[in-house]
Image: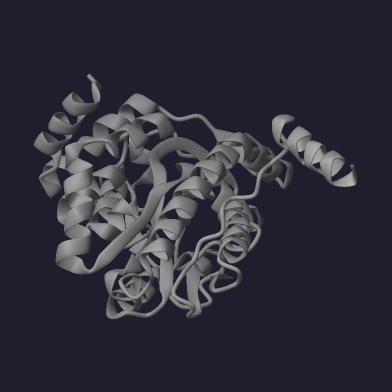
């Protein structure tokens, strides 16, 4: 009788909609470890997402596949770690389309100023033949495997110690930005002088007057405490920052097929979860920076969008943008 009651109780739990653990994934009996490298602080939603992902991966493989998170550039610059990944090191790197353009040029358009207006638009691009073909080139021609590319981190804005309302206000202003052409040429077209350096170097660089400001998304700006050294949040929203996680094909190919599928599934799943969290918290981060003393400046958005066109012409992306817009139904 007790066995019958126990069986009925289990059935009731299932029917009631209680959470069901994901199926365990069998490997080849060997143990594998994946490091995740990011410039972002441990408090950033991305890192919290990686920890959640790591827990699920370990549980589903019985501890045979583990994921370890290394925030705040502990493993080095993104560019250096990407090269290590290509050479076969067991590391995943948070990256963006601008940096991936160093390997497949055309993919860089996704990282250009005002290419997309929001998360939904930039995600539509991933369904295009353009995107799929370029991701394939990353793998087949450059040894880079995309685990997922749906980690949205919000809009990026200029952060300075003087108010910026139009492109002319950025003349002579040294702004830190990543070194990839999609980033640097866009920032230059918008009026600033781009300066390449690691994100974790920004705080000290502003203090030492090596730069006059930066451009970044709210989650990263708050995590780096830029409100202590910069005064204005100039709401340009020039980049809609979509990041991805990549590993080297050399290391990825050593995994059992079941573990490969698991990583693709879990990184895609967590990317969606974290993107939703970032979107929800964007205004919260801005509010916290304002509370710390920063001021929000509304800008002439039309003027900035017009200025950005020069970068598309310079990098040869103007016609490509038209083709992509047509495919996703954007006028």
Q: Is residue 215 visible?
A: no
Residue 34: x and y, percent? 48, 72
Count of marks overlaid on the render: 0
- Rendered-image quadrant of the C terminus: top left
- Where does the N terminus fall, quadrant-wise? top right
* Colour scheme: one colour
Of 190 and 89, the residue lying toward us: 89
Seen from the viewer's position, the closer of residues 226 and 122 is: 122
Residue in view at x 25 percent, y 22 percent: 330
Q: Is residue 231 visible?
A: yes
The percent coordinates of residue 214 (x first, y second) are 46, 54
Determine whether 310 is above or below 262 in the image: above
Question: Vertically, is 47 above or below 285?
Answer: below
In the rendered structure, the answer to whether residue 165 lies left or right of residue 181 reads right
Residue 206 place in picture, x, y as percent: 52, 64
Closest to the observer, 278 or 197:
278
Left or right placement of residue 33 versus residue 231 in this view: left
Where residue 88 sits, quadrant-wise, is: bottom left
Say which residue appears at 19% left-offset and 54% top-offset.
Answer: 136
- Looking at the image, residue 204 sits to the left or right of residue 88; the answer is right
Q: Residue furthest right?
A: 2
Question: Where 103 falls versus 64 (above or below)?
Answer: above
Whether residue 266 sits left or right of residue 195 in the image: it is right
* Residue 273 on image: x %, y %: 56, 42
Using the image as rendered, state which of residue 288 and residue 328 is in the foreground.
Answer: 328
């Amino acid at each position: 009788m007790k066995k019958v009651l126990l069986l009925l109780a289990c059935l009731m739990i299932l029917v009631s909609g209680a959470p069901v653990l994901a199926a365990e994934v069998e490997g080849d009996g060997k143990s594998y470890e994946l490091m995740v490298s990011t410039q972002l602080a441990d408090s950033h939603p991305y890192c919290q997402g990686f920890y959640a992902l790591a827990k699920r991966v370990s549980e589903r493989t019985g501890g045979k596949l583990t994921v370890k998170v290394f925030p705040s550039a502990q493993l080095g610059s993104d560019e250096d770690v990407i090269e290590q990944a290509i050479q076969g090191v067991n590391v995943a790197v948070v990256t963006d389309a601008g940096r991936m353009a160093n390997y497949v040029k055309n993919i860089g358009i996704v990282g250009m100023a005002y290419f997309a207006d929001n998360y939904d638009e930039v995600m539509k691009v991933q369904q295009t033949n353009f995107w799929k073909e370029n991701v394939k080139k990353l793998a087949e021609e450059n040894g880079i495997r995309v685990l997922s590319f749906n980690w949205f981190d919000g809009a990026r804005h200029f952060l300075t110690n003087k108010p910026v309302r139009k492109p002319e206000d950025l003349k002579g202003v040294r702004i830190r930005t990543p070194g990839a052409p999609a980033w640097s040429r866009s920032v230059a077209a918008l009026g600033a002088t781009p300066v390449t350096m690691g994100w974790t170097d920004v705080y000290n660089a502003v203090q030492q007057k090596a730069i006059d400001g930066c451009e970044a998304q709210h989650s990263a700006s708050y995590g780096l405490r830029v409100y202590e050294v910069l005064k204005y949040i100039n709401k340009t929203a020039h980049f809609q920052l979509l990041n991805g996680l990549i590993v080297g094909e050399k290391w990825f190919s050593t995994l059992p097929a079941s573990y490969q599928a698991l990583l693709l599934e879990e990184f895609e799943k967590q990317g969606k979860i974290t993107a939703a969290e970032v979107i929800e918290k964007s205004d919260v981060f801005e509010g916290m920076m304002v509370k710390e003393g920063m001021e929000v400046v509304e800008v002439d958005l039309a003027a900035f969008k017009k200025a950005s066109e020069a970068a598309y012409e310079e990098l040869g992306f103007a016609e490509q943008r038209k083709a992509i817009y047509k495919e996703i139904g954007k006028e």
